[in-house]
Amino acid sequence: MPHTAVLSGHALDGRYELHDVIGEGTFGRVYRGRDQRLARPVAVKVIKPWWTEDPDWARSFEREAQLMARVNDPGIVQIFDIGYADEGLYYVAELVDGESLAARLRHGPLSPATAREVAEQLCRALAHAHAQRVVHRDVKPANVLISADGRVKVGDFGIARLAEGTTDGAAGTIVGTPRYMAPEQARGRPTSPATDVYGAGIVLYEMLAGRPPFTERSAVELALRHLSDPPPPLPADTPEVLAAIVERALAKDPAARYPSAREMADALAEARAVVSDQDAAGRQPLPAVARAGRASGLDDPELLGQRPEDLAAASVETPEDLAAASVERPEDLPATSMGTPEELPATSAETRRDAPAATRVASRRAPRRNMNPAEGRRYRALLVLVVLLLLGLATGAVLTSSSKVRVPAVSGLTRSGVVARLRVLHLRAAFGQRYDSAPRGTAIAQQPAAGTRVQTGATMRVILSKGPAPIAVPQLVGQTSTDAQATLQRLGLGAGVTAVPAPGVSPSTVVRQSPGANADLAPHSTVGLFVAETPRWRPLTSFSGSGSGQSVPFQIRGSHWQVVYSMAYDGTCTLIFFCSGPSAQITNLNSGATVSQFDLSEGTGQTHVFKSGPGLYQVTVTPGSDTASWSVHIEDYY
């Protein structure tokens, strides 16, 4: 698989900044980003370029994004935008502040109560998608996001399909993740909401057991296990009600599972009280020694449940611990140790009565001086005023000399490059766009011009290239193939010519084009031309019989058609000189009129040509009195 460059630091369409990579999958790479226009964090998924080289895949992707955007629920990651930049096709989604369930499960299984809560929220979100006729088809822990406040959000509907299956996915195409794939997915059969129920069951199993039920490395082995093997038993302490929910959700037959994700969510909601009670009952009270340890601050799990002599040895404090413990904060002292001002004299007197204080030597005092306080204050105020005035003059001189900067040249830089260069000089940028031959997204003009001196903080107008101007596709249907190709060549577009049958149309005439007239295309794009091919005889239908009548209807598309027939007697005629063989009658089923009648006894390889034009016709062969075998072939000319 080829590699793509990391796009951190780019700005898609001059709007979506790409920061660090937060995930990568088969189809693209996900970046933490920022929407500059709305000033909000977003997640941006940029599709790998080799996928978008196929225009059919790109159109399918756009329809998928539209499908995802219509599923609006707090439990589903919301799609904001979709676009096509030089860096590739992308879509913008809500950024979830949290972690994936897959990351959380790396630390081991969840408690039954937590697993039940996550599974219920997951099923509620899937039920909302099913109500919009959307099946996720890739439910797994990596696509289950848990926000900082504990809410579950389902993300990456990248392979979602409408419940009726009316999408571009080819029949029999297997999509999904093998470890979480329902049996019907492994067989390449149509999916339904029951497929997501199976995926939710696998996720619940992994939350309880710490691993999925089947972990073989080979995709084929995983598919076979999902098709035929029951999942291994859950841990012994799993509540029976959760084990029963998992068992039903993982039924091999979709009809045996919960009919919908909503019913599975309701079953999980009903199990809440039982699971919570059992989870609480499963927490045994701590031993007395452990309780004493916790009360005294010995919370180390390795010490809980040890023998008293072990605890005694473990409770020896280091000198650093003793030093830290001996330093008390004022708020930690008893309230009686700090009296109010009224209490201090009494306390001092009592202290003098009980324990006289030792005599202390008084500090030496400087000799008394005669001072004028008012004059001193005026002198100090004048001095401060002079200093402030000098500082203001110096600051103004510095600011005056440095408040202007020289405008740099930004031609050829991308939007992010322009912002970075101006930020260093404390300048701002206002962006505009216009069509130009320069690469899309690069600066092509600026105002003021490079070298101009402007005030710091000023705003600079920068024009970015939108790339070459799009070309409007002309109306080409009805032109000859040669004229249509010449028209496209003059416009800077290419042509892809395909010959197609076109009854009643002159050969080499354009009967259809893709895209249609007035569509905008980038220069050097290709327009598909579907050209009428030269008419020829085409087999339409054939039938045969022996001694029995038969009627066959058929549809004629061309301007004329023909009947080719053969007949041979099985034995001799009834009369020597006269044979009564089978006959044929041609009827126009639209009008009921008889077009022609003829005998099949005329010989072998006979042909009747009819120029009655398009329509619905019927050939009726009536057996004669003599035994004969015959065959009839209908050919259409277009």
Image: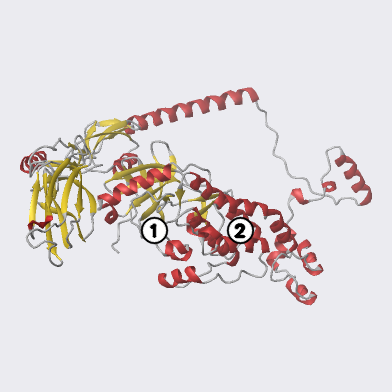
> Residue type at mark 1?
Gly
Number of the label disc, if any, that sits on residue 25: 1
According to the image, what is the colour scheme of the structure?
Answer: secondary structure
**Relative depth, front residue between 423 and 91:** 91
User: Mark 2: which secondary structure?
Assistant: helix
The mark nearer the N terminus, 1 or 2, is 1
Q: Is residue 281 left or right of residue 8?
A: right
Where 486 falls versus 552 (above or below)? above
Distance (Cα) linking label 1 and label 2: 26 Å
Q: Is residue 350 left or right of residue 632?
A: right
Q: Position of residue 593 (x, y in %)?
A: 18, 39
Note whether residue 605 is visible.
yes
Q: Position of residue 13 (x, y in %)?
A: 31, 41
> Residue type at mark 2?
Ala
**Relative depth, front residue between 324 and 445:** 445
The residue under label 2 is 115
Q: Quadrant of residue 507?
A: top left
Q: Quadrant of the N terminus?
A: bottom left
Q: Quadrant of residue 611?
A: top left
